[in-house]
Structures are given as structure tokens and as C-alpha cells.
Amino acid sequence: MARASADSVLSLVDQRLVAALQCDGRLTAEHAAQVLGLNPATVRRRLHALGADGTVRVVVSPVARPRNGGAAGALFLRIRVLRGKLDTIVAALAAREDIPFIDVTTSGDEIFAVARTEPGSRDPLVFRQLPSTQAVTSLESATILHVFRLTSEWRHQVLTAPERAALTPSKPVPGAAASDSQGPYGVDADALEQSLIDALTPDARLTAATLAARTGHPESTVRRRIAQLTTQDRLITQVLVDPRRLGLPIEAKLLLHVAPDYLAAAGQALADHPAVHGAFATSGPSNLHAAAYFPDLTALYDFLSRDLAGLGISHVETAIVSRGIKRTPSPDAALPALAVAQRRRARAGQGEG
């Protein structure tokens, strides 16, 4: 049997397993089989196959939702570069730990990125490094003011609501006291928690036994702490999968101008839309940014002409993504082959010196 191409659409069973992992990145094959009505052996085999060939990766999300949706210190960057220099700039950005997300648009000379920064600071990347780079022809930056929807919160719409509820770990009652030892999303973590987060960041499905061996703590302690982090929303996983494999080959970035009295409602409407995997209020003339997946251009047109109506939006700029370059703290995993080769040559050259 011929092997499926790298961008062929996954079977419905595999798509449902991807959606199940979106609900719980550390989901067991037994629980998935029970909820989805599948054979546990089939689920184990399919999950292994999806992970083994790199189709699906489950990582710790590089960006967490701030409390009450407030800003956590991040910038949207829109960078235009000289043609022929795109891969060089992309490689340099992807190597930075403070850049968790990078997209390249179909224009061929445009990069969208997210940069972590201190709110209100004169970030060196924005104020000095990018402007002084001759390959960069223009740079726009916008501060994230409010989070409506994060990529880690997006769900592929192939499960029923009862299935999603059964697959999603239970959360604490709102207002319940949190642990004194708090996690990596804006609060201090103890040594055990930090070691677990570090180990899980590139592969959030590592077993408790593997984590125990890596951290030197008893397996029972590791299981208990992982369960605590998950229920307290301090271990946020994200499923990395090419949306084309889910039958969603069109990704659009939307820069919207919204009247102030419509901003909150428009942002929430976008966050509630099943196609939208990111929605943020920002500084700048485009005060609402969004990103969404679509099965085709007709669906994108319907979204623009129908679903955005009545939200107080006076202007929309749409950019279609050609490549999602980085979705993880591990830069080499998502870089295009040319950029990886460039980085390796650069490192080799430094070693020779």
C-alpha cells in the first residue's frame, strides 16, 4: 500500500483522536477508547503511529492564558523583508526563546510572529535589532492587551459536546484555594514542578515512569503532582498538527478595526467561533487580531462576509498563511529544511573558528 502523503487528510478516527488529545494531552488509550467507542488496542496503535511519524506532537503550551484575560507581556510583530532573505530572518527569529510563534504569509516577504516581552518596555528586538537589519524593510508591533482565545484552547470540531466533556479533565471549583506552590504561568514553581515542566515541554505525553527516572522522584509523587498541575490549569498542553491533515488547509490572519464599544463583544464572538484559534485585543490601529482555520477559500469568504457582520468592525485586513514555522519552544522541530541547514552551517562555521 502506498504511504499517504505528508499533507493528506487523516482518517476520521485519527482526527477524532487528535481532537481527544486537544481535550487532554496526557489522555490514556483506555480512556479515549471508552469515550470514543473504539478498541483500546486500536487507539494505542493509532496514537503511537501518529506520534512516531511526527504527524502529531503534544507539548506544553509556550503561551498561557493570563488571569482574567489580561496581558502577560507579548507583542504581535509584522515583519516585511527583502525577497530572498525570508528564510534567513525566519531562522534567526525561530532560534530565539522569546519567540514562540512564527508564520509566513503567501505574499512571500511577510512574517507574523509573537514575541514575549515586559509590558511597556523598549524591547531590544523591536527597537534595535530588527530595525538595524538591512533585510528588514518594515516592522509593525502591537501589544497584546487582552486574550480572548489561545491556540491551545482551539478544538477540532469532530467530537460531540458530551465526548469533549468526558475527555476533559475536571477543574477545581471557581474560587477554590490554589496550592501554595504555584506553577509556571506567572507564579513561582518549586523544584519538582519546574523539573516536570521542563521534561514535558517538548513531549507532554512522557509517562510517569519516564518522568520519575528523569527527575529522581518516586513515580507516585510524580503522578500526584501531574494530576494536581492538570486540574489547576497549571499544565497546559497543546497539540501540534498541520491543520491540512485535519482538512483545514487555509489559515488566515485577520487584522480588524473595531469601535471601542464593540471591542469586547466582537472579541468574544470570535473566540466562540469554531474556526478561530486565536483572538486578542491589541494596541495599534488594528485593535483586534484573530487567526482561523478553514477548509477552503469559500469558507473564508463566508466567514468574512457573514460571520463578522454586526460586530462593529469597520475594516478587515486578511493575510493567508503559507507556512506555520514555529509552534513550540523547540525551534528546530518546525523550521523549514533550508533554515535548519543554514543554522547548522553557521554553527559549524563558529566551531571552526
Image: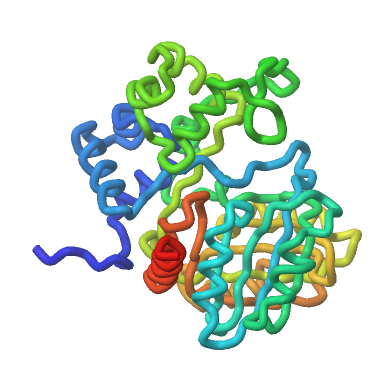
Q: Nearer the viewer, residue 264 or 305?
A: 264
Quarter in which the N terminus is drawn? bottom left
User: Horizontal placement of 82 versus 250: left or right?
Assistant: right
Q: What count of labels does the image hold?
A: 0
Q: Quadrant of residue 113?
A: bottom right
Q: Nearer the viewer, residue 235 or 165?
A: 235
Q: Quadrant of residue 26?
A: top left
- The coloring applied to the image is rainbow
Q: Measuring 69% from the left and 52% from the top, which residue is drawn there?
A: 116
Q: Measuring 52% from the left and 75% from the top, which residue is drawn there?
A: 88
List the single residue furthest toward the front: 353
Q: Position of residue 248 (x, y in %)?
A: 44, 65
Q: Position of residue 51 (x, y in %)?
A: 30, 46
Vertical relation: 313 (above or below) 280 = below
Vertical relation: 220 (above or below) 253 = above
Work out whether residue 248 can be spotted: no
Q: Measuring 23% from the left and 31% from the top, which residue is drawn there?
A: 40
Q: Position of residue 284 (x, y in %)?
A: 84, 68
Vertical relation: 275 (above or below) 328 = below
Q: Position of residue 135 (x, y in %)?
A: 63, 82
List the single residue furthest toward the bottom: 83
Q: Nearer the viewer, residue 41 or 199?
A: 199
Quarter in which the C terminus is drawn? bottom left
User: Horizontal placement of 52 versus 274: left or right?
Assistant: left
Work out whether residue 176 can be spotted: yes
Vertical relation: 39 (above or below) 171 = below
List the single residue furthest toward the left: 1
Q: Measuring 33% from the left and 37% from the top, which residue is drawn there?
A: 36
